[in-house]
Amino acid sequence: MAKENIVLIGGGGHAKVVIDAIKASKKFNIYGIVDANLPKGKSVLGTKVIGKDNLLSEIFKDGIKKAFISIASIGNCQTRKKIYSNLKNIGFQIPVIIHPKAVVAEDVLLGQGTFIAAGSVINPGVRTGKNAIINTSSSVDHDCSIGDFVHIAPGVTLSGGVKIGDETHVGTGASIIQNIKIGKKCLVRAGQTVIGNFGDGIKYGGSKK
Ligand code: JB2
């Protein structure tokens, strides 16, 4: 059976990881990339940039019904939120993409547009909201709850029952012990160890505001 076409939004660093996962999973044919800045015709891992976001309505009318956000936008998910809402307004379906070398337990529930990268382990009872990113080699243990537009960066460890609020970024290599609650729009800086709860809008670790 022919693979369904999918258009990608964004052709930077994260797109390479997404393209690799899509190719490995063999579920979709990548139709092309729309990117706000890259020149038309540029190749990203063999996939061409076909234009900018104003092409999306036309692409949808031409019969491409699936789209995926291939931008991670570290520490600021406003770009992803804006793109997600534009895609939904046009009518696109935004699937879940899982690298086949991730381990995802049977009962895990993943929100629309969630990306699960290679080497990550998602244990039973985990839930994600929409457009969450569980990045390379991260470990999300049983019963964790991950909000909308959250980015769990490479190498993060979440023990069982951790709750991460919407739009929070957990930086590379951070570790969070069991049953901790982190609020919305927080930043856990790379490499931090979190052993206590914190509320919305907190930037945790390091000396920067
Ligand atoms: O509104 C937009 C838009 N805003 C930025 N629409 C579209 N279609 N494209 C947009 N872009 C494009 O996303 C930029 O022009 C750029 O080509 C791309 C973002 O690439 P960048 O490499 O800056 O960020 P990323 O989120 O793909 O990857 C970062 O985060 C990853 C987690 C990188 O720093 C990676 O190294 C990292 N692994």
Image: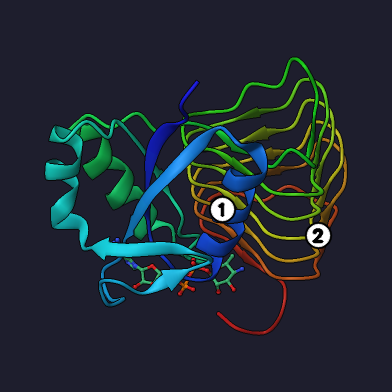
Residue placed most toward the observer, 8 or 145: 8
* On-image quarter of the C terminus: bottom right
Counting from the top left corner in percent of width and height, residue 52 is at 21, 63
Q: Residues within 10 Å of mark 1 (few under 14, many from 20)?
A: many
Residue at the limit of the structure toward the top, as seen here: 107
Report if residue 5 is visible in the image: yes
Query: Residue at label 1?
Result: 18
**Amino acid type, callout 1:** Val
- Report the side of 136 relative to 91 (left or right): right
Q: How many labels sit on residues?
A: 2
Report if residue 133 is visible in the image: no
Counting from the top left corner in percent of width and height, residue 109 is at 63, 21
Residue at screen point 16% across, 35% down = 62
The quadrant holding residue 63 is: top left
Instruction: Classify mark 1 as within 8 Å of ligand 1 or not, answering yes or no.
Output: no
Residue at screen point 30% across, 72% down = 41
Counting from the top left corner in percent of width and height, residue 147 is at 55, 37
Q: CA distance from mark 1 to mark 2?
A: 17 Å
- Report the side of 209 relative to 138 (left or right): left
Residue placed most toward the observer, 10 or 83: 10
Mark 1 residue element: helix
Residue at screen point 56% across, 53% down = 18
**Badge 1 or badge 2: first in the primary sequence:** 1
Query: Residue at label 2?
Result: 155
**Amino acid type, callout 2:** Gly
Residue placed most toward the observer, 33 or 173: 33
Q: Residues within 10 Å of mark 2 (few under 14, many from 20)?
A: many
